[in-house]
Image (spheres, rainbow, N blue to C red):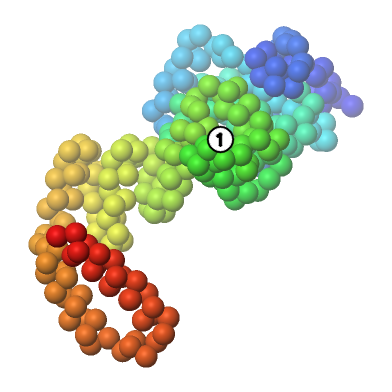
Amino acid sequence: MSSKSQKLPVKRLKGLDSLFGESPSESTSLPTERIALPKQQPRRYFDAKAIQELTESIKQHGILQPLLVRTLPDDDLYELVAGERRYRAAIAAGLDEVPVVIRELSDGEALQLALIENLQRENLNSVEETEGILQLLALRLDRSLEEAVSLLYRMLNDCIRMTNNVISHPDTIIVKEVFANLKLMSWESFVSNRLPLLKLPDDILEALRSGRIAYTKAKAISKIKEETERQTLLEEAIALDLSLSQIRERLKTNRPEKETPQTLKSRMDSTYRRLSQAKFWDNASKQKKLEKLLAEMEALLAEE
């Protein structure tokens, strides 16, 4: 085996090692050509301006935080686990070598560390952060994303109803530990405020993921149910950098005026007319329900 393809000693990363109960160690250097990007990368979008700023910083000061890589069966390559922004900026800065920490990691451990590193150190947008936390939970729970979401909603329902159906389940301990370690938000806040994000229309989600619009603006635009109208306002909001108040004004302009609400008396009159024309007088079950309602109304009149 040539010296170029010879594997370097495996070392550990300070900070993230605590998640696996290991002590920290120092970094080493590795040629950029021997680092392969992971097939599964939690972060999908990289802001071009931010990458350029990081590139200029690396040109002046170098890479201050080493990248995390893991060994691969191929003797010539190591897979990048955490630090893709630094890796991309280093390439742009023309570096031939970068500081790294090498770890022996399984696929699951590598993905967990990549997710945690992104969530703790990178400025993710709200959708990427939500998806990253959910993916991390699914990995730690050894469940599908759908099962993890279902568990979270059942936990919240338990708290609201003050029951103990799920909240004492061992999986809930894992959920609480993940949020306690991340220190980003409580699990209750995640379920109430973040999971609804993933139910937004696809065009809204895509704009949020790419960082082209803020969450508060996207949420307001998502209230438009008609797809073409929603996409038009979304494109205008991005192109013109509309403020939230300007978006709300456009929503008011496009919203049809609501019909004048019926008074209680008019509703009663309308209901009586419909009841007189109804065709369920021979239905014993419906007659019984009607008799009960009629008795309640007669009781109200008796109080006069």
* Residue 89 visible, this angle: no
Q: Measuring from the top left, give residue 95's x and y in whole percent.
A: 58, 19
Q: Measuring from the top left, give residue 283's x and y in whole percent.
A: 39, 87
Residue at x-position 82% and y-position 17%:
9
For the N terminus, the image quarter is top right
Foreground: 221 or 47?
221
For the C terminus, the image quarter is bottom left
Residue at x-position 36% and y-position 49%:
204
The quadrant holding residue 288 is bottom left
The quadrant holding residue 15 is top right
Image position of 76 (left or right of 219): right
Image position of 277 (left or right of 90): left
**Mark 1 crowd level (few <14, some 14–19, many ≥20, 10 Å Cα):** many
* Residue 303 visible, this angle: yes
Q: Hey, what amino acid is under mark 1?
A: Ile
In the displayed structure, would residue 117 be above or below residue 138? above
Q: Measuring from the top left, give residue 47's x and y in whole percent.
A: 42, 32
Foreground: 62 or 148?
148
Q: Measuring from the top left, give residue 30's x and y in whole percent.
A: 70, 20
Residue at x-position 49% and y-position 34%:
188
Foreground: 275 or 121?
275
In the displayed structure, would residue 27 be above or below residue 225? above
- Which residue in the structure is indicated by mark 1? 133
Label 1 secondary element: helix
In the displayed structure, would residue 28 be above or below residue 207? above
Residue at x-position 32% and y-position 44%:
219
How many marks can you see?
1
Image position of 259 (left or right of 96): left
